Amino acid sequence: MGKKVKKEVESPPKDVFDPLLIESKTAATAVLMLSSPEEEVLAKACDAIYKFASKGDENKVTLLGLGAVEPLYKLISHEDPVVRRNAVMVFGIMASNHDVRKLLRELDVTNSLISRLAPEEDVVIHEFATLCLAHMAAEYTSKVQIFEHGGLEPLIRLLGSPDPDVKKNSVECIYLLVQDFQSRAAVRELNVIPPLLELLKSEYPVIQLLALKTLEVISNDRETRIILTEHQGLDYLLKILETKEFSDLHVEALAVVGNCLEDVDTMQSIQRTGGLKKLLSFIGVSAVPDVQKNAAKAIAKAAYDSDNRKILNEYEVEKCLINLLGNDDDGVKVATSQAISAMCENLASKRAFGPQGIPQLVQLLSSDNEEVKEAAVIALANLTAASPSNASTVAEAEGIEPLINTLSAQRDGAVANAATVLTNMATQEPFRLNILSHGIMSALVGPLRSTNSQVQSKAAFTVAAFGCDADARTELRNASGLEPLVELLRSKNEEVRRNACWAVTVCSSDELTAVELCRLGALEILEEINLSTGHKNNFSEGALEKLLDNNLSQKYSRMGYLSSSNIITDGFYDCGQVQPGVKFLSLEELSKQELTDRRAVIFINVKPQNIVPVVEEKPQDTSYEQTNLSSSSLRRGSREKARKGKGKKEEEKVKEDDVQITSEVHDEVNLENSCWLPPADFVLLDYINDASKTILPLTTTWKQVVALAQFVADKMGGPIQRDKLHDFSWELHISEIEFELKCNAVPIGKVKKGTFYHRALLFKVIADRIGISCSLVRGEYNRAWNEVKLVDDSPQGIPGLLLPPQEYIVDLMFDPGYLMKQGSAEADRYKCI
């Protein structure tokens, strides 16, 4: 019998846990499992979370809310490769969510992710780490973190990865990083060009596209363009353009080529290899708007260099651009117009564009697209600069009206350049008059009120170009354009201030405009400008002088001097010297003030208009009260300047003028709507007529001056002895006149006892009317005098010798008609004592 042996079974150790399969149906459980110490649990939890996150953005938000990001962050550096891989995969997927990326930045995960790009890591880790970095690189803060942690070098290395997903994610991340200039410089040093060019050969279009986009950005730097050319980068790009199968890459390839063509060396290189001819031919046959747009941009970039413009002109690039102008796509129109603007710096190109290009550009001014309108008018501004023939072409293409309409465009660049084109056309009188007939001065009021300094400057300059015409000045005045023009004098922009001064100079050519400019404060602003060394300019002094020359009342009040060329006309008044900062009042305002004990205002007016008819036989009926009409502004009569040597004909003409003035009868006088005018001074009219009859026939200017001085003195109280000057009660006489007229404004013909400044003014008024050249100078203590330039007789024994004229002071008080040499003791005594 055999013996039966019983086998003993060993029981497992008490401290060992039997394997447990857990099936979880909630993400929360998987998130809890991320804290497990077991690699297998961690790996499976990460895998489950990856699948859950891949289903949509809502799931990513759920995981974020469950606190999955923090434990996952710890796991991307786990020792176990499977756990590490699965955790990085989750980050790669979840980083597409904005809120997740925000938390990743706060946790500063970039350094850990960059560490996962090491060569020894699994290719899947490379794929999802680069994917996560690409998502994060879309935001500036993360760009900085990736750059500072040295992320560029491993990313560039991974461009040579055998895995297409790694290549795609790496190049996308680099593309986003090089938007920042620091990264652009860094990738150049890290030799990024060769691997990028290699990616152009990829079978995956998305990789090729991202490589081209990256090249487009980094080739904005000249140093990078040089490296690109050295590595035959243009050959790669031209091959892409020549290949129809790569049509989806042509737009980006052209953008890179455009950057490269900015360099003359590159342009010459592509010209030698025949690449430029191919490029222009390609542009001509392409029908893709984006391709055409980028082609035009490439030409524009190249054309910023003068040598490049010459090369492009030799290849007749103008024809290509003119054809592109006819495209229906607005983007193409804009880019083409910009290319034309750049090319027309070349004179040959400017001429070539004219006949066919300008009419098309004029049509674009009516576009509903404001960007198209702006680009077109900028091109026209460049084409018409210093080119009368092109300016003529604009007019012939009926461009005036659309240009004036463009002055009210929405874009400041369009407005400024429309003003420039119109200014360029204004150099030719027929076009200037045509433009004026379209109401340009009214259209310029809006640009003058602009807040853009370029628009302000161009508008002011255009006002100067057209303001030489009297009707234009009237239109600007009536359109309330003078007010914004005066405000531009205060501009802190030097060019605006200079052009405004020039415009004021031109617009001051007529009296009404000059008076209005003064009323608006132009005079005070110009005085302030001229006192400032920083604000003073070449036109500010001229503007002040011109303004005063056409507003003589204010000039004499402020400057105390009227030159021989300053002809006193009707409406002039002397209100004494106005102190700085004190408002200069109009004659109407002064005449309406109540009687005061201040100095009387002496005015000049012999030709009233729109007044009650005057009866010549009864001049005493035309009292001040009867002829004082009230309304808005002062209008001076036309200048008249009688010349000697006209004899009887001149006398007859004066009589005719006299009859016309005194017998003019209006059928109807509307007192409410008529302009305010000072009363007629018929006594002064008689003085002028008498002087014309008695003084003009005299044979020399010397005799005329002496006779006129005696004439004036006789009308103003006669000669006064020096020691009796204080007894000459002229003040009382003037006060009586003011009381009689019930007004502070006194016509000079009423003054029968006049002192120095009354006589000097009357002398100047009559001298200006009969053609004697003299100046009027205000002194102190009620002094004023006239200065004349006369030629002395030839020295004895030297007949026919012509001596230069000398300046004399005319005595009108003590010995009327006596002439004192300027600078002599007696002349100085006359001025001061």
Image: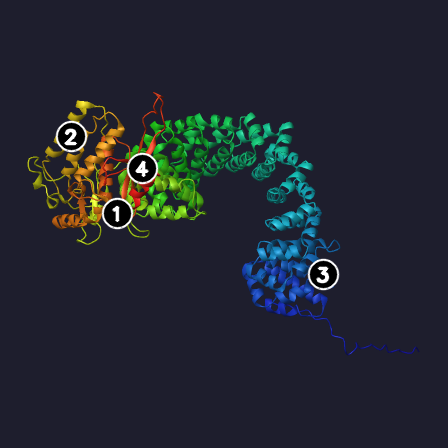
Q: Which mark is residue 82?
A: 3
Quote the CA–CA distance across marks 3 and 1. Answer: 109 Å
Q: Is residue 716 visible?
A: yes
Residue at point 14% right, 38% down? 683
**Element under label 1?**
loop
Q: Earlier in the sequence, mark 2 or mark 4?
A: 4
Quote the CA–CA distance across marks 4 and 1. Answer: 19 Å
Residue nearer the viewer, 515 or 299: 515
Label 4 Cα crowd, 10 Å radius (few <14 / some 14-19 / many 20+)? some
Label 3 Cα crowd, 10 Å radius (few <14 / some 14-19 / many 20+)? some
* Residue type at the position of mark 3: Val
Question: Can you say whether 202 is above or below 326 in the image?
Answer: below
Instruction: Check whether the beta carbons of the residues at disc 3 and disc 1 lie within 8 A of each other.
Output: no
Residue at point 42% right, 30% down? 360
Q: Quadrant of the N terminus?
A: bottom right
Q: Which residue is mark 2?
A: 657
* Residue type at the position of mark 4: Ser
Residue nearer the viewer, 637 or 354: 637
Instruction: Check whether the beta carbons of the residues at disc 2 and disc 4 lie within 8 A of each other.
Output: no
Quote the CA–CA distance across marks 2 and 1. Answer: 34 Å
Q: Earlier in the sequence, mark 3 or mark 1?
A: 3
Q: Position of residue 295 (x, y in %)?
A: 54, 35
Residue at point 41% right, 48% down? 531
Quote the CA–CA distance across marks 3 and 4. Answer: 101 Å
Instruction: Check whether the beta carbons of the residues at disc 2 and disc 3 lie within 8 A of each other.
Output: no
Viewer-nearest of labels 2 and 4? 4
